[in-house]
Image (tube, helix red, strand yellow):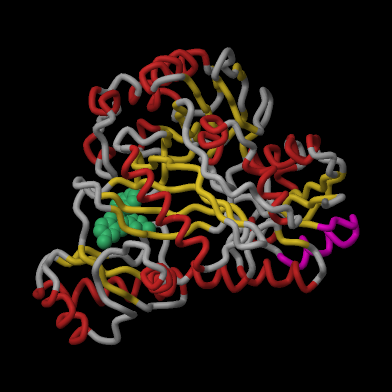
Amino acid sequence: MFKKILIANRGEIALRIIRTCKEMGIKTVAVYSTADKESLHVRFADEAVCIGPPPSNKSYLEIPKIIAAAEITNADAIHPGYGFLSENAKFSEICEKHNIKFIGPSAEMINMMGDKATAKKTMRAAGVPTVPGSKDLISSVKEGLKIAEEMTYPIMLKATAGGGGKGMRIVNNPEEFQAKWDSAKQESAAAFGNDGLYMEKFINNPRHIEIQVVGDQFGNACHLSERDCSVQRRHQKLLEETPSPFMTDELREKMGEAAIKAVKSIKYEGVGTIEFLVDDQRNFFFMEMNTRIQVEHPITEEVINFDLIKEQIKVAAGIPISGKNYYPQFHSIECRINAEDPLNGFRPSPGKISVLHTPGGHGVRVDTHVYAGYTIPPHYDSMIAKLIITARTREEAITKMKRALDEFVIEGIKTTIPFHAKLMTDKKFIEGDYTTKFMETFKFE
Ligand code: MV4
């Protein structure tokens, strides 16, 4: 087992990782920017190294500084958390070259999944359902028009380097093709320095349902059931839950089996997520694979009673998994509490937290790095806490969530707490009748 892990991250996930390391008897090293000097991850780690000024590209994204911090503290592994360098193939490779275990997949695996057209092709070859579309990247408008003609409009153009919806366009008819092609190309070139596009049939009004997976160094793989992440706004998740209100035992078996196929076919090592689009007929299609621990991992932990960070560290240390699948025993919902003003387009609201009271009681978990008197720096993600509620049924979880949100007091900044409180009373949400289009019509005012 590792003796000392450096956590190349900040905020709640850095704390989350430190907690598991402590329980496993592993020493921890925090890295921090000057903006995070007063952060709890710095205080709770055994050692801490300052790696630069506030901007991420001068601190948390600076590979040489992080490697240097690991070397001077004698860390034998690095946990990247989510965001920052967690899906950076070069970083994974550089860690290995320095004999530091990257707690995550190889550079090769990250590269394969980072290129969406390659990921899709690999999954299709493995027998995982994918959305009908082009077999490869499209080389010209002429070729695109021809492929589109063989399918039925509307179609979707997608950036192979994509993510977060960038470089993605719906094309409703051949007349629109050229303009949509040009703008998708331009946007992906600017965003990713890669303008490769591929094509898919447009799935109208899908759900975003993902399957948590784990693969070990011996080719074993298992799934840990689903999370429904359909409540999103501009590709930012706001709430996640498991089980999905749309799930059936039959669909879970099929999606779980497909996810395991995906993991085994590439001999994936580590925790990961297979994201699917699910249509109203319960057809499901591979969308992307995330090769990291995700923000919403706690809801899975709660319903299967299993520490995913511990499992991630064990797998990285070469310990085999049991190989059996895990099914939800409870219902869990996570509300992302962001320092944002939901009344003003979810605009960021950094600043000092003057008063803080976190909710408690049975089935209530709050993962956060903030405290009363803490100043939220403007340089990073606006998520400041995750409120995770677990109960026997979805109905009980919603009732408990409402109670916990009402108990949650954060003064000094605007947060998404009132938004979530309203969401808990929404008829469609309560009925579980929501898709990725839900936020287009949900009214919060
Ligand atoms: C789609 C789609 C409909 N049809 N692909 C959005 C992010 C990117 N990773 C994939 N996305 C979508 N791909 C086909 N063929 C609709 C979306 C989509 C979406 C997917 C998941 C969660 C929220 C979404 C919001 C808008 C569009």
Residue drawn at (61%, 31%) of the image: 367
Query: Is residue 330 toward the left or the right of residue 252 in the image?
Result: right
Q: Which residues are magenta?
A: 63-76
Q: Is the residue 188 above or below the residue 163 in the image?
A: below
Q: Is the residue 377 above or below the residue 200 in the image?
A: above
Res. 298 image quadrant: top right
Indicate the position of residue 403 as horizontal and vertical percent values: 45, 13
Query: Is residue 142 toward the left or the right of residue 375 in the image?
Result: left
Query: Is residue 319 toward the left or the right of residue 418 in the image?
Result: right
Residue drawn at (67%, 26%) of the image: 371
Res. 437 image quadrant: top left
Does residue 195 appear anywhere in the picture?
A: yes
Indicate the position of residue 231 as horizontal and vertical percent values: 35, 39
Query: Is residue 241 toward the left or the right of residue 91 in the image?
Result: left
Indicate the position of residue 145 as horizontal and vertical percent values: 16, 80
**Is residue 74 within the magenta segment?**
yes
